[in-house]
Amino acid sequence: MIDIKDLKKSFGSNHVLNGVNLSVNRGDIVAIIGSSGSGKSTLVRCIAGLEKPDTGQILLNGEEYLDDGKGVGKIGMVFQNFNLFPHYTARENITKPLTIVKKMEASAADEIAEKLLRKVKLENAANQYPATLSGGQKQRLAIARSLAMEPEIIVFDEPTSSLDPSLAHEVFQTIKELAAEGQTMLIVTHQINAIKNFATRVVFLNDGIIEVDGTCGEVFENPTNENLKDFLQMVE
Ligand code: ADP
Ligand code: MG
């Protein structure tokens, strides 16, 4: 579904991505792990079109999608800090992008919002503003908002790192339910236990290069790469 070929990105003299190659198939749950500063956010931001790579290709179903607007709505993005619209209610956070970006009728957008709020167990918070929601509720709302666009893939950048463990757990429950429905996802996280036995593949990024790309067993049980071993010792 997504094909990334020899992606490079520098900020001035800081070479952040140094030739990343990655393919994501439909239904894959790909976890991206690596030390702080290794380029994880830059990589996923390039995929979401929020950052422009210097060279290399990113294809969606075999086509370039970033420059010509073909990708609008096809890549969902969920951030550590939620990025909700603070002056809209939970329901409006879902309906506004639909009526404004997708030009959908208000009644149709409301119907989708109802369904998605129920899916992330926020049906009782529809009229609340983000400031009144817990961190876990905010993140589940962000997930619902992203689902409303029917993205081909949802990219999560450390979705639970600002949440305490019980809220992080509830957000990962939601993420796992989506995975069970076949939603393709890319998840950047330090929460190794949450992705163990769940991610279909784990990618280890180090200094802007994918050094390891394997199953949970290959990455967590029998790592051979020395940088990966050091990293796992630090986070586990
Ligand atoms: P990670 O998510 O793995 O922690 P990042 O992709 O956020 O890593 O950052 C990789 C490097 O790129 C860091 O050195 C960071 O300072 C730098 N960087 C990221 N975004 C920018 C930016 N917009 N401008 C300048 N430097 C950036
Ligand atoms: Mg990051």
Image (tube, grey):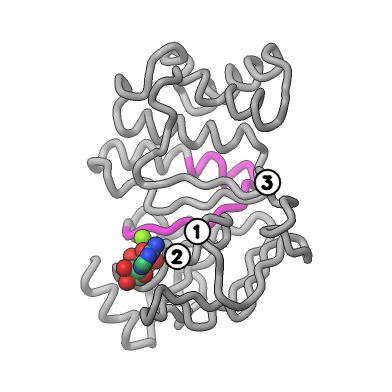
Could you tell me the amino acid type at mark 2?
A: Thr
Q: Residue at x 51, y 71 (%)?
A: 215
| Quarter of the rendered image showing ligand 1 | bottom left
Q: Does mark 1's beta carbon lie closer than 8 Å to ligand 1?
A: yes
Q: Tag 1's secondary structure? A: helix
Q: Quadrant of the C terminus?
A: bottom left
Report crowding for label 1: few under 14, some 14 to 19, many 20 or more residues within 10 A (C-alpha): some
Name the residue nearer the viewer: 233 or 205.
205
Residue 42 has which mark?
Answer: 2
Report crowding for label 2: few under 14, some 14 to 19, many 20 or more residues within 10 A (C-alpha): many
Q: Does mark 2's beta carbon lie closer than 8 Å to ligand 1?
A: yes
Q: CA distance from mark 1 to mark 2?
A: 5 Å
Q: Which residues are magenta?
A: 175-190
Name the residue nearer the viewer: 235 or 71.
71
Location of residue 135 in the rendering, given as x and y in whole percent from the top left corner: 30, 33
Location of residue 172 in the rendering, given as x and y in whole percent from the top left corner: 41, 43
Location of residue 80 in the rendering, given as x and y in whole percent from the top left corner: 36, 47
The tag earlier along the polypeptide, 2 or 3, is 2
Q: Are marks 1 and 2 in contact (CB under 8 Å)?
A: yes
Could you tell me the amino acid type at mark 1?
A: Arg
Location of residue 51 in the rendering, given as x and y in whole percent from the top left corner: 51, 61
Q: Is residue 197 above or below residue 210?
A: above
Report crowding for label 3: few under 14, some 14 to 19, many 20 or more residues within 10 A (C-alpha): some
Q: Residue at x 46, y 81 (%)?
A: 209
Name the residue nearer the viewer: 102 or 78.
102
Residue 178 visible to an observer of this rendering = yes
Q: CA distance from mark 2 to mark 3?
A: 19 Å
Residue 103 has which mark?
Answer: none
Q: Which residue is mark 3?
A: 72
Side of 50 relative to 98 (left or right): left
Q: Which residue is mark 1?
A: 45
